[in-house]
Every structure is written in C-alpha cells, then in structure tokens.
Image (cartoon, helix red, strand yellow):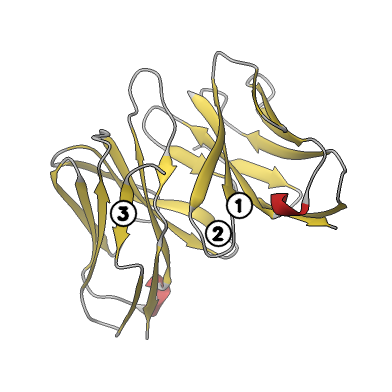
C-alpha cells in the first residue's frame, strides 16, 4: 500500500460545526488531492495541492478550504458543515510531473452531517 | 472540460467468462488513463496505468487498451472469477488532475 493515511476514518458532526479531515503521506509525492464520492456522481475533485502552500480549486470547492504547510500533510476543512457535505472523502497522491504517474488513494473518511 | 463515461453502469456475468469494460473521454489531450478497482466500503486500488504514448498495458488477467484519437479505453478481464466482483473506475489524467467516470459495478456469479 502507498503510504497514505486519512484521519478520522469515520465522523458524525452537527450542521454548522467546523470539521477538519487530515491526509498524511509518507511517499514525498508532490501532488495531493481531495475528492468526494457520492452515489450517482462518482468521484469529484474538491481541491488539490501541487506543493507546500500551493493549492487550487476543483469542481466542487464551495464550502471547503484546504491547507498544506508540509509536504506530507494536506488538510481539508469544512468551515460550517451542511447536510449536503455528507459524503465519503478520499485523499490521493501522485508525483505528477512531465510524465504523469500513478495516483494512489487513501481508505476514505465517511463523514455524516446531522 | 473533460468528461469521462463508463458503460455499462452494471454488469453481471457467470464465472469464467471473458469480459470488456468500456471507458470514453471527451478531451483526447490526456497524459494517461488509469483503471482502478473499488471494493464496497474501501478505497481505490490502482490496477493499470496507460501513458498517452502507449496503446496497452497488461497485468495478469487484466489488459487495458487506449485509443486517444477515438477517446476510448477498454479493460479486458480474462477468465473472470467471483473475487473480481467490484466497481471498476477509469480516470483520464490531465496535466495536474484526474477526471473519473462513475464506474462499472461488476458481479461475477459462481
């Protein structure tokens, strides 16, 4: 397994509360990604990072923010959780460069907003 | 904007059958095409990566092909087994990110 750890693996939170999900890698890969997976929608990119403090938005970034202060950690924050953010969140890494390489995924975080 | 489509959404076959899963993409300017497997409640496992300059990749009973000009990739599974039951996802790799199809849920019946 690629060295990717997501925490927590499961979380139940109340509407309006802030939530932070963590992705930690031991591979020293440059690129890190946050996706959400929902029935009928598949995997959709939320935000990604191409280096320390370098991030960009994906297709469903509203209501989410990210931070990357170290190569190994990529944090996803829901500033004020809503029920529509109930989902399974996946972190991925890749050493994307001129020749894109494989992407590896974490085991996911199941988030329920009640 | 890249869009990736996988047909069929679900497939049920008897054990031992050879099968093909299809993936199409709208923008042929891809860097690579990657196939993943996802078991229920689990993360994604990378199966095969085809670089844009390649036509196919093989791993065991799996063979993936890529035709950039037609915007298509196929995943061929030989001699299917019940353990192959899972959802298979393809993803088109751009310069910085992957765009996923919604997957094909495969059931192999003993």
Decide: is A69 above or below A109: above
Residue highlighted by disc 1: B102
Q: Which mark is residue B90?
A: none
Asked if marks 3 and 2 touch (Cβ < 8 Å), the reply is no
- In this rendering, position of residue B9 left or right of residue B68: right
Residue highlighted by disc 3: A5
Which chain letter matches label 1? B
Q: Is residue B57 something one can see in this rendering?
A: yes
Say whether disc 3 or disc 2 marks the residue closer to the N-terminus: 3
Residue B56's x, y, as percent?
Answer: 65, 20
The residue tagged with tag 3: helix, strand or loop? strand
Q: Is there one chain holding both mark 3 and mark 2?
A: yes
- In this rendering, position of residue A100 left or right of residue A72: right
The residue tagged with tag 2: helix, strand or loop? loop
Which one is nearer the viewer's eye here, A10 or B28? A10
Which chain letter matches label 2? A
Residue B67's x, y, as percent?
Answer: 67, 21
Q: Is there one chain holding both mark 2 and mark 1?
A: no
The residue tagged with tag 1: helix, strand or loop? loop
Q: Which mark is residue A41?
A: 2
Q: Residue at x 19, y 49 (%)?
A: A73
Between the C-alphas of marks 2 and 1, the distance is 7 Å
Decide: is B68 above or below B48: above
Asked if marks 2 and 1 touch (Cβ < 8 Å), the reply is yes
Quarter occupied by residue B4? top right
Quarter occupied by residue A66? bottom left
Q: Residue at x 86, y 50 (%)?
A: B15
């Amino acid at each position: 397994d690629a060295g990717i750890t997501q925490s927590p693996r499961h979380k139940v939170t109340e509407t309006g509360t802030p939530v932070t999900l963590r992705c930690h890698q031991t591979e020293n890969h440059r690129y890190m990604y946050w996706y959400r997976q929902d029935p009928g929608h598949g995997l959709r990119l939320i935000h990604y990072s191409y280096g320390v403090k370098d991030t960009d938005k994906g297709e469903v970034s509203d209501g989410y923010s990210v931070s990357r202060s170290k190569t190994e950690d990529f944090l996803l924050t829901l500033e004020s959780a809503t029920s529509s953010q109930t989902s399974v969140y996946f972190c991925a890494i890749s050493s994307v460069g001129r020749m894109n390489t494989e992407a590896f995924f974490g085991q996911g975080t199941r988030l329920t907003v009640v | 904007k890249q869009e990736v489509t996988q047909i069929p959404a679900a497939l049920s076959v008897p054990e031992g059958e050879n099968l093909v899963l299809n993936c199409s993409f709208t923008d042929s300017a891809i860097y690579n095409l990657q196939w993943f497997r996802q078991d229920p409640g689990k993360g994604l496992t990378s199966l095969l990566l085809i670089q844009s300059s390649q036509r196919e990749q093989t791993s065991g009973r799996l063979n993936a092909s890529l035709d950039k000009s037609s915007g298509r990739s196929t995943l061929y599974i030989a001699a299917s087994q019940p353990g192959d039951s899972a959802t298979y996802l393809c993803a088109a790799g751009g310069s910085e990110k992957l765009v996923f199809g919604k997957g094909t849920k495969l059931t192999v019946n003993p």
